[in-house]
Amino acid sequence: MGEGQGAAVRAASEFLKALAHEKRLLILCHLVGGEQTVGEIEAALGLDQAVVSVQLMRLRAQGLVAARRSGRHVHYRLQRPEVIAIVGALQDAFCAPGERLSPVPPGRPEAGPSRRGN
């Protein structure tokens, strides 16, 4: 393996490690829908603020999400286009048709039984 390939393999491995954590993957799935604050993420996913903040910090360190401050709020969004592609492929592989890995927005009925374990 050449030096360039080794660097690419290391980068891919780090990318996959970031996705391999259930809470981080759930947050990424939720952010596919657009920019969100920590409070919006915690409310939508039913996670504690501390859990969301720690996982967002890891995702920022990996360069998967970016942050934008607006007054007292920090808004997070997906930074790398390959995250959207990979999360989309995971949803295609593991979710029933019409289903999402992230929770359904309030007021919208579930598409069907979930394949995702709780």
Image (cartoon, rainbow, N blue to C red):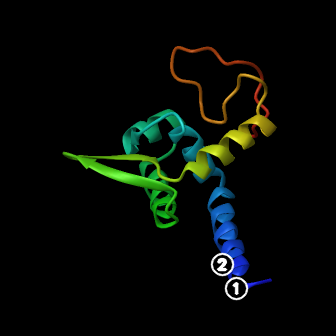
Residue 46, visible in the rendered structure: no
The image shows residue 2, relative to residue 67, as above or below, that is below
* Front residue of this view, candidates 71 and 81: 81
Pointer 2 residue: 7
Q: Element at badge 1?
A: helix
Residue at the image point whose x is 58% and y is 53% from the top: 24
Q: Badge 2: few (under 14), some or many (20 or more) residues near its Cα, within 10 Å?
A: few
Residue 75 spot, x, y in % from top left: 35, 45
Q: CA distance from mark 2 to mark 1?
A: 6 Å
Residue 91 shown left or right of residue 44 in the figure: right
The image shows residue 63, relative to residue 109, as above or below, that is below
Task: Give the tally of numbered discs.
Answer: 2
Residue at the image point whose x is 45% and y is 35% from the top: 43
Residue 13 spot, x, y in % from top left: 70, 69
Q: Amino acid at mark 2?
A: Ala
Q: Element at badge 2?
A: helix
Residue 7 spot, x, y in % from top left: 66, 78
Residue 112, visible in the rendered structure: yes
Q: Are marks 2 and 1 in contact (CB under 8 Å)?
A: yes
Residue at the image point whose x is 47% and y is 54% from the top: 65
Foreground mark, 2 or 1?
1
Q: Quadrant of residue 14?
A: bottom right
Residue at the image point whose x is 70% and y is 26% from the top: 99
* Front residue of this view, candidates 77 and 45: 77
Residue 36 shown left or right of residue 78 in the figure: left
Residue 84 shown left or right of residue 96 in the figure: left
Residue 22 shown left or right of residue 116 in the figure: left
Q: Badge 1: few (under 14), some or many (20 or more) residues near its Cα, within 10 Å?
A: few
Q: Amino acid at mark 1?
A: Glu
Pointer 1 residue: 3
Q: Quadrant of the C terminus?
A: top right
